[in-house]
């Protein structure tokens, strides 16, 4: 049975969406995509620039080589004059090469030596460029041009090793990656700082609303950012409507109870004066109505001025309640111990009604002493009310602990007003235990979550 009660009051965790987490995740994804795309563009751009630069240089070298291509005097042999080619073409595997092919003609730069290479032939005016692996693990950027000289068709293939520029390109790409990573990290922390700074406005709104739970003054929500102004206005209107609605409801109940008392008293008088066979039934019904009216008046007197939304400040809210009960039951000494607990997160009106009803019943059925203790244990607040009355039979206690069972408050010796208290305890997902004290009396223990 106790395990069923525990399961009844267990709270289910609610998955909450974190705005900070969602914004951070979105920023990280956006930064990764943006920085990755930017890095690819930078890497591609540097590659294009380096290739265009090499091709431009190859074209200039080609012009010099074509201009220096000539027939040796007195022979039909084509040669490239010494002034036409740079000395870099004279060093073996220097990374700069050229090859001129024609009808039964092949002129190689000394740097190319006898490295086997066949690049094909082009028609006059045709150009072609491509990359390929070369000698000594070099990466060759090849540019070809088809031309004609003295009616003889030639194909000029001029080559440059792009490995040094490729290495430089990757070095710059790594630096760019480092700069982008530092920029992304800086943007992330800047975003966190901006979020923290702007969320302070939400914290201020929360603190002002929370302060309303400790004081009667309406929170001032005027100094909030423009984006939060509609939310602040709605909260302000909701608080005002809630306060007015609860106040009207309690005032209406109190006024109704007071207004009905006089007609009921007149009916009671007429019933006493009349003599008929239904007189006992009429008297019982009038007593029931009178009891209900007294109950509602007592509840209004216990709670006092309505303050919906406020937390329960024990040091401020309990002494007036104890004072009222002391005047109602002057023969009962009420002892309290709540010095270690300053506030309870539950609504002030609910807690005053809960504690007030328990103390009222304890005073009604106690003999001389009632004790109220409020303490915290782990993540729960424990409220304990003890009296020194005659107690309850064990079967009555077991029936009361079953869900849905209620005990008539008017039953002599019951000592408990659980009909009101049960609804409040269940609304906060709390737990109630009930046991007889030794040598006599009842102890009611209520556990309420602190969150």
Image (cartoon, rainbow, N blue to C red):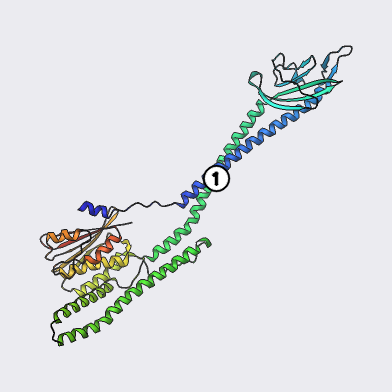
Residue at 27% x, 61% y: name it.
Answer: 425
Going by the picture, which residue comes out furthest to the top? 75
Secondary structure category for the residue under label 1: helix
Question: Above or below — where is 421 with respect to 50?
Answer: below
The answer, for residue 157, to whether it is visible in the render is yes
Which quadrant holds residue 294? bottom left
Q: Is residue 286 above or below residue 311?
A: below
In the visual, does 109 lie left or right of 45? right
The x, y position of residue 302, in whole percent, is: 26, 71
- Residue 167 x, y percent position in the rendering: 63, 28
**x, y percent for residue 250:** 32, 74
Q: Is residue 112 above or below residue 183?
A: above
Total numbered circles: 1
Hey, which residue is sitting farthest left in the picture?
Answer: 439
Q: Which residue is mark 1?
A: 30
**In which quarter of the view is residue 263 placed?**
bottom left
Q: Residue at x 25, y 64 (%)?
A: 421
Q: Position of residue 258 (x, y in %)?
A: 27, 80
Q: Residue furthest right?
A: 74
Q: In screen coordinates, is 183 left or right of 422?
A: right
Near mark 1 (Cα within 10 A), the count class, few <14, some 14-19 or many ≥20, is few
Q: Residue at x 57, y 39 (%)?
A: 36
Give the residue drawn at x 80%, y 16%.
Answer: 103
Viewer-closest of 124 and 207:
124
* Residue 32 relative to residue 235: left or right: right
**Which image quadrant: the C terminus?**
bottom left
Q: Is residue 74 left or right of residue 176?
A: right
């Amino acid at each position: 049975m106790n395990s069923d009660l525990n399961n009844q009051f267990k709270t289910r965790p609610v998955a909450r969406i974190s705005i900070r987490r969602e914004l951070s995740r979105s920023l990280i994804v956006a930064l990764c995509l943006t920085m990755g795309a930017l890095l690819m563009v930078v890497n591609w751009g540097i590659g294009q620039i380096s290739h265009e630069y090499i091709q431009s240089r190859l074209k200039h070298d080609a012009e010099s080589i074509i201009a220096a291509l000539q027939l040796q005097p007195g022979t039909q042999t084509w040669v490239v004059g010494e002034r036409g080619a740079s000395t870099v073409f004279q060093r073996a595997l220097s990374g700069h090469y050229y090859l001129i092919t024609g009808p039964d003609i092949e002129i190689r730069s000394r740097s190319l030596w006898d490295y086997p290479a066949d690049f094909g032939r082009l028609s006059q005016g045709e150009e072609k460029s491509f990359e390929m692996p070369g000698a000594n693990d070099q990466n060759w950027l090849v540019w070809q041009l088809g031309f004609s000289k003295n009616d003889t068709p030639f194909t000029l293939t001029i080559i440059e090793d792009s490995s040094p520029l490729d290495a430089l390109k990757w070095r710059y790409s790594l630096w760019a990656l480092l700069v982008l990573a530092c920029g992304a990290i800086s943007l992330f922390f800047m975003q966190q700082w901006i979020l923290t700074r702007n969320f302070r406005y939400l914290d201020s709104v929360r603190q002002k609303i929370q302060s309303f739970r400790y004081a009667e003054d309406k929170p001032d929500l005027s100094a909030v950012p423009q984006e939060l102004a509609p939310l602040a206005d709605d909260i302000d209107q909701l608080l005002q409507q809630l306060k007015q609605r609860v106040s009207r409801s309690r005032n209406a109940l109190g006024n109704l109870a007071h207004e009905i008392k006089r007609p009921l008293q007149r009916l009671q008088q007429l019933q006493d004066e009349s003599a008929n066979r239904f007189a006992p039934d009429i008297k019982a019904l009038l007593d029931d109505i009178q009891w209900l009216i007294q109950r509602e008046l007592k509840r209004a007197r216990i709670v006092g001025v309505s303050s919906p939304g406020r937390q329960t400040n024990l040091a401020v809210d309990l002494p007036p309640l104890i004072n009222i009960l002391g005047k109602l039951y002057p023969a009962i000494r009420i002892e309290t111990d709540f010095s270690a607990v300053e506030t309870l997160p539950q609504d002030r009106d609910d807690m005053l009604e809960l504690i007030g009803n328990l103390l009222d019943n304890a005073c009604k059925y106690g003999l001389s002493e009632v004790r109220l203790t409020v303490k915290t244990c782990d993540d729960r607040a424990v409220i304990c009310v003890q009296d020194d009355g005659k107690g309850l039979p064990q079967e009555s206690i077991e029936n009361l602990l079953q869900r849905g069972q209620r005990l008539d408050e008017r039953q002599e010796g019951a000592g408990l007003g659980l009909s009101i208290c049960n609804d409040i305890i269940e609304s906060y997902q709390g737990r109630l235990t009930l046991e007889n004290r030794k040598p006599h009396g009842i102890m009611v223990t209520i556990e309420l979550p602190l969150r």
